């Protein structure tokens, strides 16, 4: 019995030792939070801001915070990559205005699709700093509404939509060089543009395929 117990203890010790060796040789799975922090740091160091998905107050707040932080860090150019169907117009206004407010120049880089309020914030950079990747699609149109309630409130909302539509038209005309009359007509309906068509219209300055294409910007 004593011999058997001694053998059992020896086997258990060996098994435990083998397990520890195997665990030491096996790479530790990365933690999601650590990966996120690592990517955030790398993005910050490359002075890149990502705007993906619907433009909301939360997206605008985060984007503005990053722009202000990078601007305080250095006056070197900031690359903002935009892929969004649009969203809240006033949230797009915030990003548009802050991109123009800070001292560091902002390079807008469209990818995927840049539509509605996303096109508006994209126009926050001067034309020579508006770029897009080859497959980017652009969309401009007038703001939409869906207000209910008393007739008086609906009338106020309709008036604000008309004012917003004119403001959008003025920004597009100013930033593209298109006549305001043409822009007003173009945004009456959805107007989709390919990358090449966006360049011809004045939304973007040129198509880029590699980061190196931004050299000397």
Image (cartoon, helix red, strand yellow):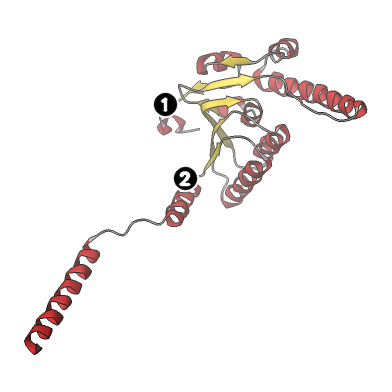
At 48% from the left and 46% from the top, the residue drawn is 43
User: Could you tell me residue 200's position as x and y percent?
Assistant: 57, 13
- Asked if one can make out residue 177 in the rendered structure from this viewpoint, the answer is yes
Is residue 62 found left or right of 7 in the rendered image? right
Q: How many marks?
A: 2
Q: Is residue 42 above or below residue 183?
A: below
Most foreground residue, 20 or 93:
20
Q: Earlier in the sequence, mark 2 or mark 1?
A: 2
Mark 1 residue crowding within 10 angstroms, few (<14) / some (14–19) / many (20+): few
Where residue 3 sits: x, y (%)?
Answer: 7, 86
Q: Is residue 140 left or right of residue 15?
A: right
Q: Residue at x 71, y 32 (%)?
A: 89
Report which quarter residue 108 is drawn in.
top right
Q: Nearer the viewer, residue 205 or 90?
A: 90
The disc placed on residue 209 is 1
Judged from the image, the secondary structure of the residue bearing numbered disc 1 is loop
Badge 2 vs badge 1, beta-carbon distance below 8 Å:
no
Q: Position of residue 198 (x, y in %)?
A: 56, 17
Indicate the quadrant where residue 107 lies.
top right
Residue occupied by mark 2: 46
In the rendered image, residue 171, in percent from the top left (x then y), is placed at: 72, 24
The answer for how far apart the CA atoms under marks 2 and 1 are is 18 Å
Quadrant location of the N terminus? bottom left
């Amino acid at each position: 019995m004593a011999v058997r117990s001694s053998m059992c203890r020896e086997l258990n010790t060996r098994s435990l030792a083998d397990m520890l060796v195997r665990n030491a040789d096996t790479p530790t799975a990365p933690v999601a939070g650590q990966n996120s922090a690592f990517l955030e740091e790398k993005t910050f160091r490359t002075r890149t801001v990502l705007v993906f998905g619907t433009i909301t107050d939360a997206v605008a707040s985060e984007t503005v915070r990053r722009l202000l932080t990078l601007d305080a860090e250095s006056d070197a150019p900031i690359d903002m990559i935009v892929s969004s169907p649009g969203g809240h117009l006033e949230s797009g206004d915030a990003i548009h205005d802050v991109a123009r407010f800070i001292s560091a120049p902002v390079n807008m880089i469209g990818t995927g699709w840049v539509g509605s309020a996303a096109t508006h914030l994209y126009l926050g950079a001067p034309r020579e700093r508006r770029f897009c990747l080859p497959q980017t699609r652009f969309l401009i149109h007038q703001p939409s509404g869906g207000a209910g309630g008393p007739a008086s409130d609906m009338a106020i909302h309709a008036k604000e939509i008309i004012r917003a539509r004119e403001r959008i038209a003025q920004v597009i005309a100013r930033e593209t060089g298109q006549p305001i009359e043409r822009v007003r007509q173009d945004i009456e309906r959805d107007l989709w543009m390919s990358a090449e068509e966006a360049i011809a219209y004045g939304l973007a300055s040129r198509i880029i395929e590699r980061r190196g294409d931004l050299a000397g910007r």
